[in-house]
Image: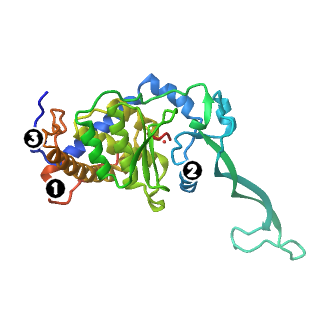
Amino acid sequence: MTQKRYTAVQKKNPEDKLKELTDKLEAGIKEVFSSQKYKDYLKVMSRFHGYSYNNTMLILLQKPDARLLAGYKTWQGMERNVKKGEHGISILAPSKKRFTKYMDKIDKDTRKPVLDQDGNPVKVPKEIEYLTFYPTTIFDISQTEGKPLPVMAEELNGQVTDYGIIMDSLKETAPAPIRFESWEESKKGYFSPLLNEIVIKSGMSELQTVKTGFHETAHSILHSGTNNLKDSATMETEAESIAFIVCCHLGLDTSSYSFPYLATWSSSKELPELKSSLSTIQKTAHSLIEKLDQAILKHIREHSIEGPEISRDTGNPDISLEIADREPEIPALPDTHRRRR
């Protein structure tokens, strides 16, 4: 089928386009919450929990491709066992400690110590509680085997028009090198801050590969240094939301994957992670689209071929070509965890 030259077909305010896509994203995620599949998923996922900033750093340094973590006994409780020879991930677990300390009894009126008949301060017991940390070991799902866990986001299928041009353009645009690797587990890819590289699973469909590439690129832009790390739920929400918006810009529908995926990372139906990151998502998506557009157009000129119809009749026409010469002005929107990729 003959495709149109890559161009901005419709004249629509770019900020409105971005808001339209984030509104669509929010509505799609909320719809997932009412499904029986989500309820079944929560029964299992309630066994897992998020990790603190410090533990997130420890996990990334030891196993940057980790996506679902639990202790040895927790995995056994879900009918999965740690594979022989696997080395766990060391983190710090909190432990509450208590002891009794005898303190001077204070008169509530005079605010002075109460004295006994011999003139000595009266002592009363007070329970003191404090927090300590001890090293413990956890394992990623890729280090275990056994009963499959419920899956919310089914892998995307389908081909992508001008797949080669889009992937070549992404490789030029991403701030970290992209390479492919084969593995058995279901994770789609990961970004390693330590090695500064993006790794994508080989053998996936073109649509899943492109979506994963944008997701990991978003991580490399926003979460590349220790000062930029956030909680896992927020980082995954930002990366997948940006991937969804960029794919929509290219006329690619990833809603069947992105909506359930984001629902699993939200801590509540109010979508606090999404709403707190809307400005970051919109600005980063705009910047990535703008750079991607330029790279795609360059490849089209180099190959002297007709370009992909990026501005298809999807309701999501070209975002960046009309505003390439000015800074984005993203309007403030109202305030509206766990497995990677």
Pick the residue in front: 245 or 44: 245
First in sequence: mark 3 or mark 2? 3
Residue situated furthest top in the rendering: 36
Pick the residue in front: 162 or 207: 162
Q: Which mark is residue 168?
A: none
The amino acid type of the residue labelled 3 equals Val
Residue 209, position as x, y percentages in the image: 36, 37
Could you tell me if residue 238 is visible in this image? no
Number of other residues with Cα within 10 Å of mark 2, as a class: few under 14, some 14 to 19, many 20 or more: many
Number of other residues with Cα within 10 Å of mark 1, as a class: few under 14, some 14 to 19, many 20 or more: some
Residue bearing mark 3: 9
Q: CA distance from mark 3 to mark 2?
A: 45 Å
Residue 106, position as x, y percentages in the image: 74, 69
The amino acid type of the residue labelled 2 equals Ile
Q: Residue at x 16, y 60 (%)?
A: 326
- Is 135 above or below relative to 29? below
First in sequence: mark 2 or mark 1? 2
- Is 151 above or below relative to 102? above
